[in-house]
Amino acid sequence: MMNIDKYTDAIRNCRFCFMCRHISPVANVTFAEADTPRVRAVMIYGATMHPEWWSNPDYIAMLYRSDLSRCCTRHCVNHFDENSLNIAARTDIVEMGYVPENIKAIRDELVAGADWQLSGKADVLYFADPYSTEAGTDRVFAEIMKKAGISFATVSGCGCIGRALKVLGFADDAKAAMTKFAGVINASGAKSVVVSNPAAYHALKVDAAEWGIEINADVMHTSEYFLSCGLNISKQAGKLYYIESDYLRNYNELTFPHELLAKLGAEEQHLGASCDFLDVPDQQESFTCGEGAVVLPRIDAALVEKLAKRVVEQVDDPENDRVVTASAYTKIALERYTSLKVETLEELVLKSL
Amino acid sequence: MLVAKDSYMYEMIRTELIDAIGAEFVHTCDDDKLGHSIDYYWIPEMWHDRGMPTPKPDFIVHPGSAQEVAKIMKIANQYRIPVTPWGGGSGSQGGALPVYEGIILDTKRMNKLIKIDKDSLTVTCQTGIIARHLEWQCNKAGVSTMHLPASIACATIGGFLAHRGTGVLSTKYGKIEDMVMSLEVVTPTGEIIRTLPVPRHASGPDLTMLFLGSEGTLGVITEVTLKVHPMPEAREFRAYVFKDFHTAMSAGAELMRSRLQPCAMRLYDETETLTHVSKVFGKKLDQGAYLVFGFDGPKEIVELQMKYAREIMENKYHGEDYGSQGGMDWWKNKYKFFYPGFMFHIPQAFGTLDTVATFSDIENVYWAMKNVVQKNFPQARFIGHFSHWYEWGCMLYARFIFEGKDVPADPGEAAALYNRVWDMAIRAAIANGGVINEHHGVGLKLGRYVKDLYGSAMPVLEGIKKQLDPNNIMNPGKLGFKGF
């Protein structure tokens, strides 16, 4: 049995459906039909009858170009999961030995570099993942905690806790990475693990459970944690664009970021536009620049640049508008390729105290 | 394949295309070729489902401007290469399929909104823009195209222009051809032309209308100015269930003859009411025919029109009132019908036999199509609804459905069965006052009926094609024109 066999529904229903075309983030910047859930499903269905398609470099590249934002699944009225189908197809490609060298190189680096250290001891353990560290989110979190008078421990380091390896199709490596990381967390004795990075949140909250790996602590996103701390907000955040996170919204339907924004007095403007199925404005397309794919910049940096530039097209005044994201990944991508003023949720909280 | 990939001619042509529009926008990869080999037409879907190879283009080009389209046309003429325009690829008639391979000219990079003129209430845009993206941008400026078809998520504005598409608010705001002010077109020989800036004039024949519905056979529409409308203060819907389809049709026709101005009206026959409407709304409707309509505009005018409409529905035709909530259920779910899980899907065989006729003829057309399908294909279901209403008649959106067990496994036999249904049903429609299509276009699917429909006017149409496209490079084999 192949991994894709678990997603027969998605294969059969997505392959001839065009209804999420307008919110296909990659197709909206490459203009290529190939970069839509429809064509990926067409190809995967075709490969079930023509096994030689699995080794076609063009088809493999197409699958690895997906942003894995899951906005198509969320938009679909029956929520067919092309996103998981794509990851399953990548896993099959890995298992059949057709994985391209560039993807294998990323895997090797992620596996070899995994190294986690604990610092301090407290009930609250903050996970300073590599993206949050690069964006400085860990330092901002520390300042907030200092102002709030809350002590916390930190787990930090480099490598992957499983999600990046999973989306690349290396299922066994992914599980091993999470097993190793869970051991570090469980050894800390912390009651709560607080996570800024939405992908890491999903890995700890969902992937670990799917792999049967126990995390002996409550996993909380920083937005949920901040709401629970009773922070003393003294300044209103005002008008801003909030970029919905793939992992927090599309994968987990987490409402904490919006509750936090409301508490901070944010006046949210919406990127893209509304959905006819809903009565409230709702950002349908993903503008995370590939947060769902975790390591997309290492696969196709030029594509991430295009995704970032599409965000610029969505705001009214690129030079002055404020853009807020829950994702350090997205902040890094937007700051690398655009002149947008981007803040993380943590930075917004710090300014409001 | 036009020329073998290992032939030096292949590289010569590719080099010229790259020189014209840039390497990034000339694709020859297998994934994009596959993506352009199947549209929303059942035959290529079935072909792929059965593991058969689908015709693929040699090159996919993504021009960003009319000038780049013109360069591509000149290259295609020089080497006599067929060019098939592709917008969203969501057409159901096979109009965008590269049946003679060659070049697919994907328009989606031409996606810029150029200008919203708030004095004249018009929007000018490139035609590769996805309709939903254009509508979003218009909404942001406080206006709407009011062109809201089910394919709004995936089809481009150019696609609608090319096949004379229509949206759910057509009864008030018109089909796409009613919305157009003017066009920019690149002709098959690479000239960039503009039609007159306004649609109403006495300055000679209307070139705008010549290109609308030409399905990429007479050139590539690269820019359009469309009418837009202010966002209405109110939009109200109301639904009724009538004892039978005939009574509901009579009520609907009377509403149109009253010259009240509904923005939308839709009538589902008894079968579709029972199966589809019930399923989508999650409500049990055991019998009767469901009719929904709405008005939009200033609130007081909407209320007044609704008052008069209710008198027709309730007092004269005794419809069972499902209220404004019953109507809003339809409005909120209007696209849901087309998502997988609600839409028909392979292994089923299905097709939309849409046609249009006057109120005098439309019920005859409905029964003629239904009878011919049921008599000759007893294993098929026939359902229908009436989607787009005019002062003089309405459109029939009839569908036939074979369950998978009734569809031959052999792809040739399956296609033959499918085509037989079309042959009988469409000819029944024509014989009773209908036409071969209302808003999906002709494409590959219906080309064989065009000569019947146009009769002695067909040479005029063919003469225009020959004059504009002397080398027959533009979308050959579609719209009833000759192949390559």
Image: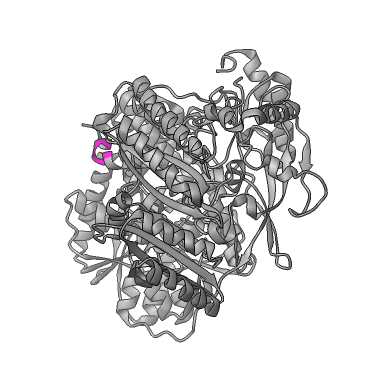
Q: Is residue B164 above or below residue A205?
A: above
Tell me which corner region of the image, top left, top right, bottom left or bottom right, holds residue B473: top right
User: Magenta span covers which residues?
Assistant: A4-8
Q: Is residue B402 above or below residue A286?
A: above
* Badge count: 0
Q: Is residue A214 visible?
A: yes
Question: Quick check: B121 left or right of B2?
Answer: right
Q: Is residue A273 visible?
A: no
Q: Is residue B55 above or below residue B432?
A: above
Q: In the image, what residue occupies the spot 50% across and 36% down?
A: B430
Q: Nearer the viewer, residue B373 or B250?
A: B250
Q: Is residue B346 above or below residue A198?
A: above
Q: Nearer the viewer, residue B289 or B298?
A: B289
Tell me which corner region of the image, top left, top right, bottom left or bottom right, holds residue B42: top left
Q: Nearer the viewer, residue B287 or A110?
A: B287
**Quadrant the C terminus of chain A occupies:** bottom left
Q: Position of residue B358 (x, y in %)?
A: 52, 49
Q: Colour scheme used in the picture?
A: one colour
**Quadrant the N terminus of chain A occupies:** top left
Q: In the image, what residue occupies the spot 56% across and 49% down?
A: B130
Question: Quick check: B33 left or right of A44?
Answer: right
Question: Quick check: B396 left or right of B410?
Answer: right
Q: Position of residue B141 (x, y in %)?
A: 62, 67
Q: In the image, what residue occupies the spot 43% across and 44% down?
A: B364
Q: Which residue lies most toward the right here? A: B203
Please name the predominant secondary structure of the magenta segment in the image. Answer: helix
Q: Position of residue A298 (x, y in %)?
A: 47, 43
Q: Position of residue B294 (x, y in %)?
A: 47, 66
Query: Magenta span has B10?
Result: no
